[in-house]
Amino acid sequence: MKIKKIILIFIACFCLTGCTKYISDDNNKRIINEETGQSLPSNILCKPTTSELDEIYNKYKDKLEVDLDKLPECENLKYYDSNNYNGLWVQLIVMPLAWLIIKIGNFLGNYGLSVMAVGLLIRIILIPFTRKTIKQSENMKKAQPEMERLEKKYANKNDQESLMMKSQEMLMIYKKYNISPFGSCLISFIQLPLFFGFLEAINRIPAIFEGDLGAYQLGTTPLIGIKMGNYFYIVLILLIILTTYLSFKFSMSSMGNADQQKQMKMMTGFMLVFISIASFSLPTAIALYWVVTNGFSVVQNLIMKRGKM
């Protein structure tokens, strides 16, 4: 049941927040930057800075969700823009995050470093909520034997009085182990919109995908990078898979019983296959964010489980 709730929350947040739109031609086929393999967003937040990308956007000007001429230069992006965007989601979440990425990128002199730095900053801000989530999981694991005995006690009792008594006893177990039934939902409600808002902010800033970080071009997908002979992208794919696996492994270890762990193991296997395939088409900027924040999550879980955080 817990796994199903997590999946439902994930899907709901994705549907509500995933509003990046892409340029399509007259046949509704996405326009892709052939040099990088990246699908080009049509509702960008600022102007492209390179002549090549600017040429593509001007060619499909009538297909954009925004007026290209009215957009600011990326380095001058503001945290609020009511002239080009008026939705609450964009104004309250996406624009401020995009502004922060740009400002830190200008300070560090590299947007790749900025993406990773802001991703880590968000993770650090969310540490109190993450700590609470881990604590709740540990408490639920401790309470699991009593919860199983309670289920057996009322296994064949469906009358109103028995159901009320079962609920009261369950609340007593929750109180004994300091478990909040709605705690995990509240934490997901805070974390997931920030996660999707950050990804959308990255995806809608052309300047990010025009930059480089070491051997990586931030807009290039690993598939295109490997085709071009840059085998450092294989390392990036392996890091995505490894950090994702370790992150899921910690989540699985916090499941209360064997059935939940079995479900989590199946979901982990599915997600690993899905992410492994998807990693080939992720722009490098998003891939770097994924690796760094998942790596931070793994280290954070290790420290918290040892009681040092």
Image (cartoon, grey):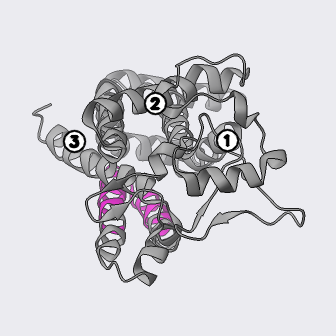
| Front-lying residue, 195 or 183 | 195
Circle nearer the viewer, 3 or 2 = 2
Q: Is 194 inside the magenta-drawn segment? A: no
Q: Can you name the residue that lies furthest to the right here?
A: 26
Which residue bears the numbered disc 3? 300
Q: Where is residue 269 in the image (x, y as percent from the top left)?
A: 45, 71
| Front-lying residue, 113 or 175 | 113
Which residue bears the numbered disc 2? 75
Residue numbers of the magenta segment: 241-267
The residue type indicated by label 3 comes to Gln
> Which residue sits at x=68%, y=56%?
56
Q: Residue 56 carries which label?
A: none
Which quarter of the figure has residue 178? top left
Quarter of the figure with the C terminus: top left
- Looking at the image, residue 219 sits to the left or right of residue 237; the answer is right
Q: What whole-number distance in Å separates the C-alpha atoms at marks 3 and 1?
A: 27 Å
Q: Earlier in the sequence, mark 3 or mark 1?
A: 1
Q: What whole-number distance in Å separates the C-alpha atoms at marks 3 and 2?
A: 33 Å
Which quarter of the figure has residue 166? top right
> Which residue sits at x=63%, y=39%?
13
The chief SS type of the magenta part is helix
Which residue bears the numbered disc 1? 12
- Looking at the image, residue 162 sits to the left or right of residue 261; the answer is right
The residue type indicated by label 2 comes to Glu
